[in-house]
């Protein structure tokens, strides 16, 4: 269970606040929650829409020795599965996962995961992991910025949430910090079962490179295995898929 939970009415970024606390002796399991963020962000430093009253924005400070794994890829997969489980339990809604870190419902993104490692200056290993989670709960389509409106949605897109944010937050916290966690192979197997694009043709963007391929599977390291038009199998560790 979390030893320290702080809730803000508004904050620039829960991940930034968690990073600040992580370098000042915050305990494992510290959780920062905000009603809104002015500078919420996701992968590649993209902004994450975080209006007040309609979403859940939270960050965890995790110690690798306590959580049982150090690799942010494993943490991302673990968190994505736990968030989906919490949503199912609280809302009776079954979301899926779009590789790497997006939570999807009916073909649109309703949330995302951002895991960031803080390296210990002496050991050069990851000493802390900051895990950010953002879930759109009751934002309507017209509430989203126009540029993301076609691909963003919420758990309750009509604006009438049937559950409280507190209930969903508690479910996520309990699952992320549960004492008995599965090993990496089981985590990736659970993650694989929830991926929404396997078997589909996708567009992959990696930096300036863009190509189409067929999504086949993920491997034991969480890399996405894709089949190129040439028949070559490539393992992707990062990138955007659509």
Image (tube, rainbow, N blue to C red):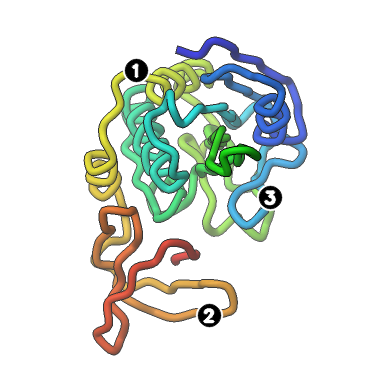
Label 3 neighbourhood size at 10 Å, few (<14), some (14-19), many (20+)?
few
To which residue does mark 1 refer? 179
**Circle nearer the N terminus (2, 1):** 1
Query: Where is residue 62 shown, x and y percent of the image?
Result: 51, 28
Instruction: Measuring from the top left, give residue 134's x and y in whole percent.
Output: 56, 37
Q: Is residue 130 left or right of residue 202?
A: right
Q: What residue sits 58% from the left and 29% below the top?
A: 58
Farthest bottom residue?
230
Q: Residues within 10 Å of mark 2 (few under 14, many from 20)?
A: few
Mark in front: 2 vs 1: 1
Q: Which disc is residue 47 wearing? A: 3
Q: Which residue is mark 2?
A: 209
Residue 177: image location, x then y, percent? 42, 21
Q: Position of residue 218 (x, y in %)?
A: 28, 58
Tally of numbered tags: 3
13 vs 148: above or below: above
């Amino acid at each position: 269970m979390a030893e320290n939970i702080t809730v803000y009415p508004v904050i620039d970024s829960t991940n930034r606040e968690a990073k600040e606390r992580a370098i000042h002796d915050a305990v494992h399991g510290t959780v920062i929650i905000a009603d809104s963020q002015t500078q919420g962000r996701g992968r590649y430093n993209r902004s994450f829409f975080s209006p007040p009253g309609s979403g859940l924005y939270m960050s965890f400070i995790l110690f690798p020795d306590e959580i049982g794994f150090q690799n942010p890829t494993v943490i991302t997969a673990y968190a994505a599965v736990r968030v989906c489980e919490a949503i199912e339990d609280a809302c009776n809604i079954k979301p899926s996962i779009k590789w790497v870190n997006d939570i999807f419902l009916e073909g649109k993104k309703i949330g995302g995961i951002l895991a960031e490692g803080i390296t210990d200056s002496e050991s050069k290993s990851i000493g802390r992991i900051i895990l950010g989670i953002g879930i759109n709960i009751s934002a309507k389509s017209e509430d989203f910025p126009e540029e993301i409106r076609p691909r963003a949605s919420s758990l309750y897109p009509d604006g009438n949430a049937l559950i409280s944010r507190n209930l969903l937050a508690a479910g996520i916290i309990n699952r992320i910090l549960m004492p008995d966690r599965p090993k990496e192979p089981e985590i990736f197997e659970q993650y694989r079962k929830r991926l929404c694009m396997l078997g589909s043709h996708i567009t992959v963007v990696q930096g300036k490179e863009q190509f189409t391929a067929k999504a086949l599977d993920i491997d034991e390291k969480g890399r996405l295995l894709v089949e190129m038009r040439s028949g070559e199998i490539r393992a992707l560790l990062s990138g955007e898929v659509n």
